Amino acid sequence: MRSGPEYDEVAKEIIQIYIDYDIISFPLKLKKICIKLGVSLVPYSKYTDDEVDLLNKRSSKGFFVRGTCEREARIYYNDLGITKEEMRFTIAHELKHYVDNENEEDLDSDDLADYFARYFLCPVPYLIVKGIVEPNDIAIHCKVSPAAASYASSNIKNRMKWYGSKLFDYELPLIKLLAPEEYHVYQRAQ
């Protein structure tokens, strides 16, 4: 189990990505975001059956390959026989490895990559401010799986139990970017 500050650092990193790359609409357009970040997306369906078998041996979901002088970084993702929501989660997960230039062998970072994917696709403070707290509403708004939406909903409800609708200082720039009307209302209420 990781400490809260480690997750807060991941949240801060995500918020900075939203701001730096002017990400302002939902559901996130991951292909456009990857282009902005300088990483290529490569679907398994681009390959022959034999090549897909090899890719699946490496990972049944997807993986990240660092860039070199000759080619940009790549995220390979399985787009065969899984839902679009699962593909989106895999891409967001692999984005964490790309953004932090992590080694593929560092499995210890996978739980943080899962957290990154959930928070990136379903930013908790934004959902709180917009009043999007039920799993079905989150799934529709953010185009995530029911499991990811339930996880986000659970995080929101736990957070609201302890902090109400209070936002942390580092979250305010995200709200100002994504929900300027609510940001001003929230600022007046403080």
Image (spheres, rainbow, N blue to C red):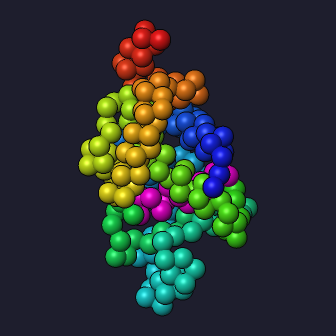
Is residue 96 inside the magenta stretch? yes
Q: Quick one: which residue is furthest to the front in this view?
A: 161
Q: Range of the magenta residues? A: 87-100
Nearer to the camera, 178 or 35? 178
Is residue 167 inside the magenta stretch? no
Residue 108: x, y in percent? Answer: 67, 63
Task: Using the image, determine if residue 53 lies above or below residue 40.
Answer: below
Q: Residue at x 47, y 51 (%)?
A: 118
Residue 8: x, y in percent? Answer: 61, 39
- Which quadrant would residue 183 be assigned to in this image? top left
Q: Residue at x 57, y 40 (%)?
A: 11
Q: Is residue 137 left or right of residue 111?
A: left
- Which quadrant would residue 112 be assigned to in this image? bottom right
Q: Residue at x 36, y 51 (%)?
A: 149
Q: Quick one: which residue is furthest to the top in this view?
A: 188
In this view of the protein, can residue 158 be seen by the observer? yes
In this view of the protein, can residue 72 be seen by the observer? no
Nearer to the camera, 68 or 106? 106
Q: Please state the total of marks drawn on the protein image.
A: 0
- Which quadrant would residue 170 be assigned to in this image? top right
Residue 20: x, y in percent? Answer: 57, 34
Q: Is residue 132 left or right of residue 41?
A: left
Magenta stretch: helix, strand or loop mostly: helix
Q: Is residue 74 left or right of residue 32?
A: right
Picture quarter with the N terminus: bottom right
Residue 168: x, y in percent? Answer: 55, 26
Q: Quick one: which residue is furthest to the right in this view?
A: 69
Q: Residue at x 44, y 86 (%)?
A: 48
Q: Quick one: which residue is furthest to the bottom in this view?
A: 50
Task: Using the image, determine if residue 163 lies above or below residue 40.
Answer: above
